[in-house]
């Protein structure tokens, strides 16, 4: 029997004991990726969702300066929020970011449900930056149109604008939401038969109409902002319909990483290409190419297999964790599963104590 030394638990454990521990305490957990540029309010939102004060000691750091993992219990359900840097940054190669995300899915995806993605957008912005456009294009091809319904665009920082400025910002944002080539338009309003994502106005209490809004102060209205943010997670992901990511479908069809639409989206020039839906896949096309037909009736979809394969959409946990030397990313994510399991053990213990 193989053993693994686990500093998380401070002892030698048989591999079956460690895996069973992880499976037991991560069972039912939902993973949500968080995307957005630095300064868009990710830390504030994650603090409200998790209840952590997010000092460095409370971050489960991947070893890179902009990659953090946040476990939380929201309305009695277990969640893991993975904060990722956006694509197009000068200091982190795009493929390094994608490889880290794929390693996360390969390892954590064996134990949890990949439930959705949050994309944060600062309402002050006049337009999408190149980095934001690249990340949104990648997100479309990474998730695929069947998963768009699980994407939430989080519009942030409304509290820092005057009422008049808020109205102007809303006009700009509405224009982005309805523009099919903005990135937001395809995700929020995809063609039939697909269901689009939704928008959450962070820190804004809405009635039936935008004119009846109340913006909550990030310092004075913390409990209310926390309640609204956690309610959004519960409503969006508590009973969400979960489907496979497009990248996993492509993997299942024997696509090499470099052949996937997500990688092609990262490599394509934004001004000379576009994202469209063909069949049930988001694909990258030349800007002048004829638009394909969306929906399951279309033939010759990128999802068609290159060869017959029964490969699972995520890797077998024992193969990931125990066969051969782990590379740095896979090793980090497997160690992370142990740390996350320990967090939820503690959370369950604290909940039991509070009930007594």
Image (cartoon, rainbow, N blue to C red):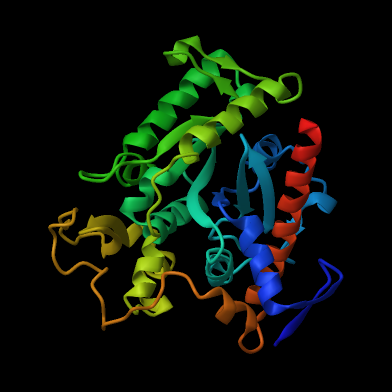
Q: In the rendered image of this protein, does residue 117 appear above or below residue 144?
A: above
Please indicate whether residue 270 sits to the left or right of residue 227 in the image: left
Please indicate whether residue 322 sits to the left or right of residue 220 in the image: left
Q: Position of residue 298 (x, y in %)?
A: 14, 60
Res. 39 image quadrant: top right
Please indicate whether residue 6 sits to the left or right of residue 95 in the image: right
Of 179 and 61, nearer the camera is 61
Q: Position of residue 70 (x, y in %)?
A: 69, 50
Of 265 and 237, nearer the camera is 237
Q: In the rendered image of this protein, does residue 102 appear above or below residue 44?
A: below
Residue 86 is at least partly visible in this image: yes
Res. 272 image quadrant: bottom left
Q: Considering the image in quadrants, where does the N terminus appear?
A: bottom right
Q: In the rendered image of this protein, does residue 56 appear above or below residue 18?
A: above
Please indicate whether residue 206 sits to the left or right of residue 275 in the image: right
Of 93 and 72, nearer the camera is 72
Residue drawn at x 66%, y 28% as measured from the top left: 226
Q: In the rendered image of this protein, does residue 64 appear above or below residue 350?
A: below
Res. 306 image quadrant: bottom left
- Specify the farthest residue to the right: 10
Residue 127 is at least partly visible in this image: no
């Amino acid at each position: 029997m193989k053993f693994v030394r686990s500093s998380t638990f401070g002892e030698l454990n048989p591999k079956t004991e460690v895996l069973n521990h992880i499976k037991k305490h991560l069972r039912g957990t939902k993973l949500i990726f968080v995307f957005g540029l630095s300064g868009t309010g990710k830390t504030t939102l994650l603090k409200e969702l998790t209840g952590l004060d997010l000092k460095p000691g409370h971050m489960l750091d991947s070893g890179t300066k902009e990659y953090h993992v946040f476990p939380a219990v929201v309305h009695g359900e277990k969640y893991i929020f993975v904060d990722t840097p956006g694509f197009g940054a000068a200091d982190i190669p795009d493929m390094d970011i994608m490889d880290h995300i794929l390693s996360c899915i390969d390892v954590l995806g064996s134990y949890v449900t990949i439930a959705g993605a949050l994309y944060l957008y600062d309402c002050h912005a006049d337009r999408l930056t190149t980095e934001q456009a690249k990340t949104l294009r990648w997100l479309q091809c990474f998730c695929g149109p069947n998963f768009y319904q699980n994407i939430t665009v989080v519009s942030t920082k409304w509290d820092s604008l005057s009422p008049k400025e808020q109205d102007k910002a809303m006009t700009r944002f509405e224009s982005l939401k309805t523009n099919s080539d903005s990135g937001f338009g395809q995700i929020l309003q995809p063609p039939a038969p697909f269901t689009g994502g939704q928008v959450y106005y962070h820190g804004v209490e809405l009635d039936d109409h935008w004119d009846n809004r109340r913006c909550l102060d990030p310092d004075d209205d913390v409990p209310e902002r926390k309640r609204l943010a956690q309610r959004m997670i519960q409503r969006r992901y508590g009973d969400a319909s979960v489907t496979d990511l497009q990248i996993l479908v492509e993997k299942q069809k024997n696509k090499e990483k470099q052949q996937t639409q997500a990688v092609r989206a990262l490599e394509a020039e934004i001004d000379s290409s576009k994202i469209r839906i063909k069949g049930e896949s988001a694909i990258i096309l030349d800007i002048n190419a004829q638009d394909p037909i969306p929906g399951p009736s279309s033939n010759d979809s990128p999802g068609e297999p290159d060869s017959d394969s029964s490969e699972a959409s995520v890797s077998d946990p024992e193969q990931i964790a125990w066969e051969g030397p782990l590379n740095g990313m896979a090793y980090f994510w497997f160690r992370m599963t142990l740390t996350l399991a320990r967090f939820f053990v503690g959370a369950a213990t604290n909940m039991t104590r509070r009930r007594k």
